[in-house]
Structure formats: C-alpha cells, structure tokens
Amino acid sequence: MAAFLKRLRCPSRVWKPLTFSSTRYPRIPSNPEIEEELIPGYVASRYYPVRIGQVLHNRYQVVGKLGFGTSSTVWLARDLTGRRHVALKLFINAQSMGTQLDIHTDIKADNIMFGIGDDLVFAKFEEQELQHPSPRKEVDGRSIYATRELQMSKEWGAPVLCDLGSAVSGDLEHTEDIQPDIYRAPEVIIEAPWTYEVDIWNVGCMIWDLFEGGSLFTGYDPQLRTYRSRAHLAEMIAVLGKPPKSLLQSGSSSHKFFTETGDFLHDIPIPNSTSLKKLETNLEGEDQQKFLAMMDKMLQWDPSKRSSAKDLARDEWIMKNM
C-alpha cells in the first residue's frame, strides 16, 4: 500500500520527451548570416550540430537556444531524469572528448552568474517554443537557430561559475599562459608547471576585488603605462614577501625577474611593504580575522600550500556569509 500511495504522489519518475515541430517554423534564407555565423573566423565544424527536440545521452531534451560563443552554443534543456531544466553548453573539442575539465583557468566576475529560482521562466520558454517554433536556417545539413530570449526571473538562486571555454583537464601538466592579467597566479607568470591551484589563487584575487571594491594586484607598470608581469610580481612581493626558491627553480622564466639567489631584478621598484591586513578596510575584529584567514589559504606563493576548493567550501567566513 505504501508503494502504491508513493506512486500516486509521484505518478512519473521521469519526464516524457515533448514533441517539437520539425516542419512548422519560420525559415530564414541562407543569406544574410546570423547568430554564430557573424563571429569573425567562424568555422561551422567547430559547433556541435544541435536540433531542438533531440535527446542527448538519453536524458537531456533540447528545448531552445539561449546563446552562442566563439566555439559553442548554449541551450535550455529538459533533464528528463532529474525532472528539471538545465542549460547545456555544447561544443566539439577533440582533445577533451571523454575528459573531465577540472581547471577553469578564467575565473572572473563576468563568468559568474546567478541561478534562476523561478521555474515559471522555463515553463514559459518551453511553451513559447511549442506554440511558436524558433526561426532557423539550414546550411549544409546543419540547423542554425535564432536565439530565444529567456524572461527575467523574479527570484535568483545561488551563484554559478560559467563559461568553460578555456577549461582544461587536471590530469595533465600545464605551462601555457592563462587567466585574466590581474588574476594570474605566480606560477603562471614565471612559466612553472601549474594545475588545480591556479584556480584557487584566481578566486582569492577575485573575492578580494569584489569585496574590497578594488584590485589587490593591478600589474600596472608606471614606466610602460600598461600591464607587465614584472610589475605584477613586484606587487606580490610587497604584499606576500619574497617567493620561495623552490617555486622560482620550477619556472622557466624565473631568470627574467629574479637572480639565482631569489632576489628581484629591480628593473622596476617594489612598492612599499604592506600586508593583506593593512589593505583590508571593510571589516573589524573577528570578521576581519576570519576573512583574512580565508584569503591566506588562497593567496600563497607556493601552490601546494593553497587550500583545496573542498576545504574552502567549509571555511568559516564563507559558511557564515552563504
């Protein structure tokens, strides 16, 4: 009887796929170019050929197009198993196929969005697509859809990290140049091998910027009047002290900025010595102590001394302000 009542409360454990029209839609001429076709250097083969109504991985049914980028498109989809709506970013990347992308490498305020807490927004989007199918064009067997606007939500959910276009696998050793200039980790600047910890440094700098209302490091070179790595390192030294020799020994470009004994090459003056505590101006007492303790877990010269994302999720200051 209990099982029967449970079935009454939840008559279907999964959503059934909807039927979207494949013939009744506004047709767009092959010319002019639209949507992702307008991106400079557009190559059609870089984009996954999506069709509204198709079910991906026997789970996600594509409802409509939310947007596009330089190598991918973003779609609203129905999670048939999870009975919810999700946004899917679909792209083709032969090197990453079947590989989990663990390191974001490009964390900044522009790549953080808020979840939508009002499910009616998705229901209306879905209804609009069923009643008024999106305009599209057919080019070489591919469908290029017009983006459908998602109505503004009245309720916001938790922040979500987006734009994985620059993400890489954590299983490999990396040395390539990454990250927004002012958020570059020291190991990236000196071209030392890097991995997960670059994201931790990146997040620490971004949190400081958002919370304090200004950049912790700017990398502004007063002589050249632009960002330069040497100015960035000089600012780090002013706040964090000298970098450990072990880090410098791992960087193929360390010699450009430091002597063999670890002294900074003074092509540019090091700013006056300071600290995170002296620079922090918004908090007092215990709140300030906890905030600075969290920052100290992320902003370490030595990547191995930075906390993991899992540990930071349990940090006192973060837990209090969630």
Image (spheres, helix red, strand yellow):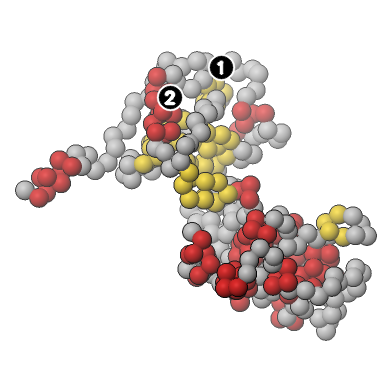
Distance of label 1 from label 2 (alpha carbons): 16 Å
Say which element carries label 2.
helix
Identify the residue at the far bottom of this view: 261
- Give neighbour class at mark 1: few <14, some 14-19, many 20+ (Cα, 10 Å): some
> Residue 184: which quarter of the image?
bottom right
293 with respect to 223 (left or right): left
In the picture, measured across the screen, residue 226 lies left or right of residue 78, that is right
Residue topped by disc 1: 28
Q: Amino acid at mark 1?
A: Ile
Disc 2 marks a residue whose amino acid type is Glu
Residue 128 showing in the rendered view: yes
Q: Is residue 30 above or below residue 96?
A: above
**1 or 2: tag closer to the N-terminus:** 1
Whole-percent x and y of residue 189? 75, 65
Q: Is residue 252 left or right of residue 130?
A: right
Relative image position of residue 213 (x, y in whole percent): 69, 55
Height in image: 232 above or below 84?
below
How packed is label 2: few (under 14 Cα within 10 Å), some, or many (20 or more)? some
Q: Secondary structure at mark 1?
A: loop
Residue found at x 90% / y 68%: 268
Nearer to me, 93 or 128? 128
Which label sits on residue 129?
A: 2
For discs 1 and 2, the disc positioned in front in the rendered view: 2
